[in-house]
Amino acid sequence: MESVSLPCSGQCLESWSSLPPIHISRECSAPFPAIPASPFCPRELRSVLSEETVLTALSLCFPRMSTDLSELLKEATKEVHEQAENTPFMRNFQKGQVSLQEFKLVTASLYFVYSALEEEIERNKNNPVYAPVYFPAELHRKAALEEDLKYFYGRNWREEIPCPEATQKYVERLHYVGQNEPELLVAHAYTRYLGDLSGGQVLKKIAQKALQLPSTGEGLAFFTFDGVSNATKFKQLYRSRMNALEMDLATKKRVMEEAKKAFLLNIQVFEALQELVSKGQENGHPVQPKAELLRMRNINKSHEHGPAAGKESERTKMRSTDSTPTTSLVRWIVALSFLAMTVAVGLFAM
């Protein structure tokens, strides 16, 4: 039996000195030599053993130190999650303080993000770095968002929805990752899909009540996962597939950084949309695409001549209500939590 002797001042982990000696025999097919339990420094270990060997040894000695990718991602994004979770608009959104126009703009940005994400997922569906977590029928959101946008904007919704610069930046990052660093794509998929799946039902109820949307689900298809009968079991399956991806420690670290970057890109989208709406408020009206403004003018003209009794459709009522100026910037800040919660709250409800 061999041991590695490591000189160390013991200043890094002095509390470990009380542990009994740990010896792992080469005869047991262990992938690393025995490690003494006297005070030692991980930096000195790194100089003698490979990083993978040290991580494996420590995970055996200290089971709580997981090397599973899903756990590493959760830990890596914990700080930014806590920040988002404790913001005032996050709490206010749960009170249902959100306008229809704000909700529509956020839905439009989500459409561009998911279109790019799912295009790159399809590109890499047979790539070993992503194939194990390819669940299009269960998770993909593009088609659902198309349904919602058609409901909110009408048949010509593609011509009407805005794509702010920050949203375009997010889209470009997704395309870059999918085409140049596909091993990082799982960070974006995990951050978005499991977050949506976890917090989706809560958000659906809040939005439905706050916006008085039909109980039949129109405008809320994004939150409906018809292909997932049991969210808890599916998330367990997804995490196990993630953890089975063949990645060395260096790649896992890159995935963790990409997950944090995905969070930052989302925050930039929030800020851009907030600025867009703020400018509209300064001008005394909510921000609307050009075609939407034309429709509103037509509706206003019909009101001037007096609408026929009983002829006002539900969609016309929705649009007329939607044209009411937003009276407080706080309401828009709250709307941003819709996007934040799908990542922040949902991600850590897994």
Image: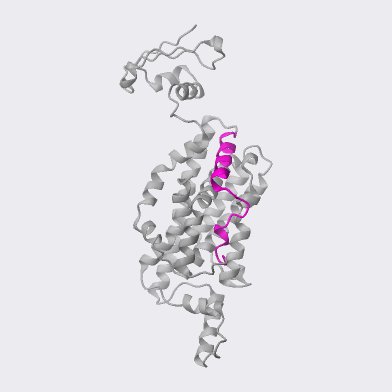
Residue at image coords 54%, 15%: 30
Tell which of 184 and 28 is nearer to you: 28
Q: How is the image coloured?
A: one colour
Judged from this view, the residue extending furthest toward the top is 1
In this rendering, the answer to whether 319 lies above or below 306 is above
Judged from this view, the residue extending furthest toward the right is 126
Image position, residue 231 (x, y; %): 55, 48
In reply to whether residue 7 is colored magenta, the answer given is no
In reply to whether residue 222 is colored magenta, the answer given is yes
Residue at image coords 40%, 73%: 326
User: Where, by quadrant of the figure, is residue 329 drawn?
Assistant: bottom left
In this rendering, the answer to whether 93 lies above or below 256 is below
Image position, residue 217 (x, y; %): 56, 65
Which residues are drawn in magenta? 217-245
Q: How many marks?
A: 0
Image position, residue 308 (x, y; %): 55, 91
Image position, residue 296 (x, y; %): 52, 80
User: Where, by quadrant of the figure, is residue 19 drawn?
Assistant: top left
Residue at image coords 37%, 49%: 83
Residue 179 located left or right of residue 48:
right
Residue 294 located left or right of residue 61:
right
